[in-house]
Image (spheres, coloured by chain):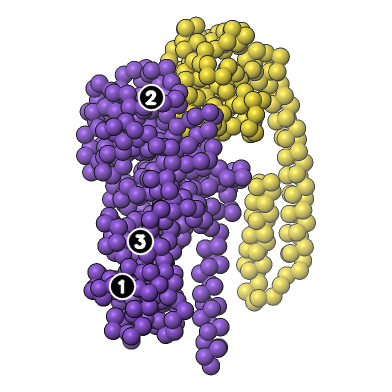
Chain colours: A purple, B yellow
């Protein structure tokens, strides 16, 4: 009987994997000093406990900042701090241990309880209980990982966030949204013409993007709650590079409507209120707002080569920020406002770098050749970007210290243009 | 084709009416059905013949039109629509002067004609920056036409950036093909 139960639960466990197998994650490297943490398998009936345990462990491992200490061999798993085997986690090197239980309630709802314990002092660092249905199990797993990460690392986790990107399959384009771990993929738009530059609204309720469906670049805004969409900018010429202001009220964009090159403008996110910000007549593009909404970083060729500049969000004098090399583009401002990620070309290679705004110091983070489109996670710890591996477009994330890399690929096609949302 | 199908439906409906009108009981009237089928077949044959004739006429008209239409006549400079650029350059080269002059002459003498100038780039580097570079190529052609008195109202310069490459491949031959602006007439 016990064996049959196991087989059944294995099959059930395999089912979700079938639909998610298209996307694979690969973790490379990690921080030099990782905090050792044990995740005791959540106890409970069915397969829910396994899903929760797997999601929490995978989330925390992917950061490269935590070292997962294995205690899965202990049966039954430790679920209480009073368990006489509690000290084993500490003996194996863990500084903290996650304990959890999953109970199926009479109304078929599922109750998930977890505690984060100091493995040495046996004190509780955090503890929560959630009631949910089966479909939301992964969501709960991500929430638990967020709590554990914030307690141990000191900044909020981004495991419950979403990433928007474009998937190209043959000649078809799809705007997709996935959980931060690449799972739960949803297609929000299909098109026979190219889609580029998706950008999340700060509250995560909308995505602005550029579509070529009208035989020219036009900016649309699409609701993530009901799927409805509207044209934001379809002026004469090209319309591109939408960027939401931090409070979501305005969108900076690039227009060519004045027959004076590609210039930066700003307009109300609901439409109207168009204002021109730059007047150079050359190329000014790829705006990125500072978190306080006061400044905009952008790419300009005004100095003879594409470099990153900073200017007031209301327009005015721009200050050049990048000086190394002849091609520095695609700025993405970090949430703390202290750094920006960008693409730097050096010796024919396009790689992701970060620059400290106060000191001007630059650190190249990646070792690939065709990196594009960096986008900072809300906690400033990771940067998602697009790159090419074996001729295929994949998404990758790199920690802002360059020590951890995660790759996300989809066998179905080329992934590109990521935007990391809330 | 649509017309044939419609006629068949009409015939079938008429046949249906006659049977139900004369015979309240649900008895199949073979004679009436045969007559309807014969009428339908004759009608279909006539329609097919009409259609073939119409198609032939349309083809002939299209052939004559393309000869008459200077924009699509392969012997006319106006059928040439691609302007290629040197690496990192955004000026229309002198070899394209006849092409630009021909289109300027056409546009100034056809005030109702409108062109869309589509700029392209190779796929190296940022997509948005490449969109802006493609715009520069489209704008270069727009300015060249404007200097020859084509009003801005007859032109729209847009960019496809690296999104719609004519040639794929990671070599200079492919990149050169994509450093390009195309002249497309509205309605084409």
Horizontal arrangement in the rendering, residue A170 relative to residue B136 (left or right): right
Q: Which residue is mark 3?
A: A35
Marks 2 and 3 on same chain: yes
Mark 2 or mark 3, which is nearer to you? Answer: 3
- Up/down of A405 relative to A295, above or below: below
Question: Which secondary structure, mark 1?
Answer: loop
Give the residue pinned by disc 2.
A323
For label 3, the crowd category at 10 Å Cα-Cα, with few meaning under 14, some 14 to 19 and many 20 or more, is some
- Circles 2 and 3, Cβ within 8 Å, touching? The answer is no
Q: Nearer the viewer, residue A329 or A270?
A: A329
Mark 2 or mark 1: name the one nearer the start of the chain: 1
A182 vs B136: above or below: below
| Residue A373 location, quadrant | top left
Q: Position of residue A134 (x, y in %)?
A: 40, 74
Query: What x and y, as percent, mark residue A234?
Result: 39, 32
Give the chain of mark 3.
Answer: A
The residue indicated by pointer 1 is: A119
- Asked if marks 2 and 1 fall on the same chain, the answer is yes
């Amino acid at each position: 009987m016990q064996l049959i139960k196991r087989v059944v639960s294995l099959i059930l466990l395999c089912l979700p994997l079938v639909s998610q197998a298209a996307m694979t994650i690969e973790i490379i490297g990690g921080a030099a000093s990782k905090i050792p943490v044990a995740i005791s398998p959540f106890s409970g009936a069915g397969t829910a406990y396994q899903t929760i345990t797997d999601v929490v462990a995978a989330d925390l491992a992917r950061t490269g900042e935590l070292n997962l200490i294995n205690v899965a061999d202990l049966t039954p798993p430790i679920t209480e701090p009073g368990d006489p085997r509690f000290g084993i986690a500490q003996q194996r090197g863990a500084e903290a241990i996650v304990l959890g239980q999953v109970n199926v309630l009479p109304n078929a709802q599922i109750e998930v309880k977890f505690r984060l314990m100091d493995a040495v002092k046996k004190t509780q660092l955090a503890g929560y209980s959630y009631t949910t249905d089966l479909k939301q199990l992964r969501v709960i797993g991500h929430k638990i990982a967020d709590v554990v990460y914030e307690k141990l690392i000191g900044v909020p986790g981004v495991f419950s966030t979403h990433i928007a990107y474009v998937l190209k399959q043959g000649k078809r384009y799809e705007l997709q949204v996935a959980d931060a771990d690449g799972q739960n993929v949803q297609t929000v738009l299909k098109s026979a013409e190219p889609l580029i530059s998706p950008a999340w609204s700060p509250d995560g309720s909308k995505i602005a993007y550029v579509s070529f469906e009208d035989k020219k670049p036009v900016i649309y805004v699409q609701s993530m709650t009901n799927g409805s969409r509207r044209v934001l900018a379809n002026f004469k010429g090209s319309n591109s590079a939408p960027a939401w202001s931090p409070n979501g009220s305005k969108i900076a964009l690039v227009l060519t409507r004045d027959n004076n090159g590609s210039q930066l403008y700003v307009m109300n996110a609901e439409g109207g209120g168009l204002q021109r910000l730059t007047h150079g007549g050359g190329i000014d593009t790829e705006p990125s707002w500072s978190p306080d909404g006061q400044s905009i970083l952008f790419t300009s060729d005004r100095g003879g080569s594409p470099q990153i500049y900073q200017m007031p969000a209301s327009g005015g004098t721009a200050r050049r920020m990048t000086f190394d090399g002849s091609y520095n583009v695609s700025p993405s401002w970090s949430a703390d406002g202290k750094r920006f990620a960008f693409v730097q070309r050096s010796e024919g290679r396009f790689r992701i770098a970060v620059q400290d705004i106060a000191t001007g110091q630059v650190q190249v983070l990646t070792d690939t050749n065709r990196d594009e489109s960096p986008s900072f996670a809300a906690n400033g710890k990771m940067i998602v970007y697009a790159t090419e591996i074996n001729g295929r477009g994949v998404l990758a994330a790199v920690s802002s210290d360059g020590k951890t890399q995660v790759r996300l690929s989809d066998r179905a096609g080329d992934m590109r243009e990521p935007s990391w949302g809330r | 084709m649509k017309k044939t199908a419609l006629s068949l439906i009409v015939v079938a409906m008429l046949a249906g009416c006659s049977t139900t009108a004369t015979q309240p009981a649900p008895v199949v009237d073979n004679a009436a059905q045969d007559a309807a089928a014969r009428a339908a077949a004759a009608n279909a044959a006539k329609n097919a013949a009409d259609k073939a004739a119409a198609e032939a006429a349309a083809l002939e008209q299209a052939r004559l039109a393309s000869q008459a239409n200077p924009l699509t006549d392969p012997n006319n400079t106006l059928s040439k629509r691609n302007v290629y650029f040197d690496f990192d350059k955004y000026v229309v080269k002198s070899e394209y002067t006849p092409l630009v002059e021909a289109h300027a002459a056409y546009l100034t003498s056809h005030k109702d004609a409108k062109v869309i100038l589509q700029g392209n780039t190779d796929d190296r580097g940022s997509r948005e920056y490449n969109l802006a570079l493609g715009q520069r190529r489209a704008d270069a052609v727009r300015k060249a036409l404007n200097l020859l008195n084509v009003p801005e109202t007859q032109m729209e310069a847009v960019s496809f950036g690296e999104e719609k490459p004519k040639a794929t491949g990671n070599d200079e031959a492919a990149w050169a093909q994509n450093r390009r602006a195309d002249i497309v007439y509205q309605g084409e």
